[in-house]
Image (cartoon, rainbow, N blue to C red):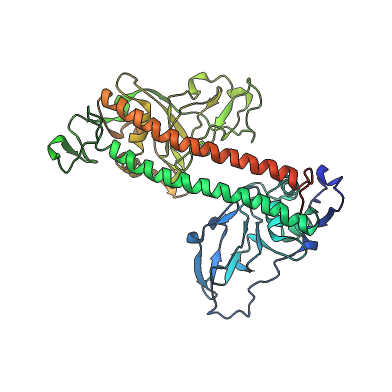
Amino acid sequence: MPASPQKSADLDSLPAGWSRKRVGEVADVNSETLGIGTDQRYRFRYVEISSVSPGRINWDATSIQEARTAPSRARRRLRAGDVLFCTVRPGLQAHAWIKHGLGEDLVASTGFAALRPRAIEGRFLFHWIFSEPAEEQIRRLEVGSNYPAVSESDVSRLVIACPPPLEQHRIAEILDAVDETTVATESLIEKLEAIRTGFLHDLLTCGIDEAGRLRDPISHREQFTAYEEGLFPVSWQRRQLRELLAGYCCGPSPTCEERTLSSDDEWGLLKTTAITWENGWDWTQHKLLPRAYWGRGELEVRSGDIIITKAGPRHRVGVVTFVDATPQHLIVSGKMVALRALPEICAPSVLAAALAMPGPQRFLDRLTTGMAESQVNFSNEALLRTPVVMPPPDEQARIAHQLEALNRCVADERDVWRKQRQLKNGLMHDLLRGKVHVSP
């Protein structure tokens, strides 16, 4: 028998005018579906789970389908104003709001519950499904370990604290305004990343001469030599990665408790999500190691390390990051390798950037093996054989200085983004519980 979405402690006492309602009382759940009588020529834009991230739909990842050839799970008809609640692995919060339909009919996967607001402000409901009270109830209702899920009836029975309509509208406006600011910051970060990527390519193929200028391979072809990876300055050398390292380490992959460190004595294991192309180095992505693995100092990540992922889905393998700062007691897992550069010949930040260049990435991709694209890996030996074209130490220092400035610019905007997310979380905590009253 399914668990009951017990009342959150925050629902025990509500402000005057607020009431407890079940989602099914204020919204219709899956009110429109494609049935067997649907015209087989019916065309629509299909929204599947993979095209949704928390709070938004990547419309480029959706597809146009016809009823006769569409996936069998394409069943939930959508309208502008609907709220999409992902019922498969709901902890990932792949929920979204249907702001508009792009002028096309929309149909979602049966992995969603389509909530059509009836007696509630739609945007208030949208923000509420991301709140802690919603999360607490959902966790109690989840069934399954590998792919936890909740049912349509579970979603209908979720208990929501509802303020009066005008206050719902005002709360939604405030949270929407924070979201808009966050989206603007994300857009700026994307632009800065694009600028950094272009400049990084120039730095690591043309280099910086003694006068501080980028070399020009077109006007001064004589200053360049051809390697398999492309044109590079004549003073640069192509070496195997092993020649540039003082050492490397690869850790264990034990079953861990899914929480972050809470004391200085505890040790944690890095997740592969700590190393991504999108976000760079994020040490907060870790989990608690079993006590038997504590004290493994030889595997502990240090500032100045380079970490590269070696196992997982193909698009997540070979991802490189430079560790500019890290707390104590975090170790690498068996899905990644920590590299330590020889300081007398190699600037770690430059080596990390060089490993992310197309040449080394193509080399590793050729040596990556696996039965399916969802689970591949490469060996440590393959990694150590990777060819890298590196400038002499004095030029590395000039490049490292430029890299630091570029990375600092992006990192500053990421800090702004994190603060905006913290602000949103704080406002949700207070506004959606009625702890702070807002005037309509």
Location of residue 239 with respect to 110 vertically, above or below:
above
Q: Is residue 125 left or right of residue 344?
A: right
Q: Is residue 436 left or right of residue 294?
A: right
Q: Residue 133 at what x, y percent from top left?
A: 75, 46
Q: Is residue 380 visible?
A: no
The residue lying at 57 percent from left, 32 percent from top is 254
Point out the image quarter for the C terminus: bottom right
Q: Residue 58 at what x, y percent from top left?
A: 52, 57
Point out the image quarter for the N terminus: bottom right
The residue lying at 28 percent from left, 33 percent from top is 388
Q: Residue 345 at what x, y percent from top left?
A: 29, 21
Q: Is residue 230 left or right of residue 16?
A: left
Q: How many marks?
A: 0
Please tell me which residue lies in front, 399 or 144.
399
Q: Is residue 196 visible?
A: yes
Q: Residue 363 at what x, y percent from top left?
A: 31, 41
State the image quarter where residue 346 is shown. top left
The residue lying at 17 percent from left, 44 percent from top is 218
Please tell me which residue lies in front, 105 or 237.
105
State the image quarter where residue 381 is shown. top left
| Outermost front residue | 439
Location of residue 416 with respect to 179 vertically, above or below:
above
State the image quarter where residue 10 is shown. top right
Please tell me which residue lies in front, 80 or 64.
80
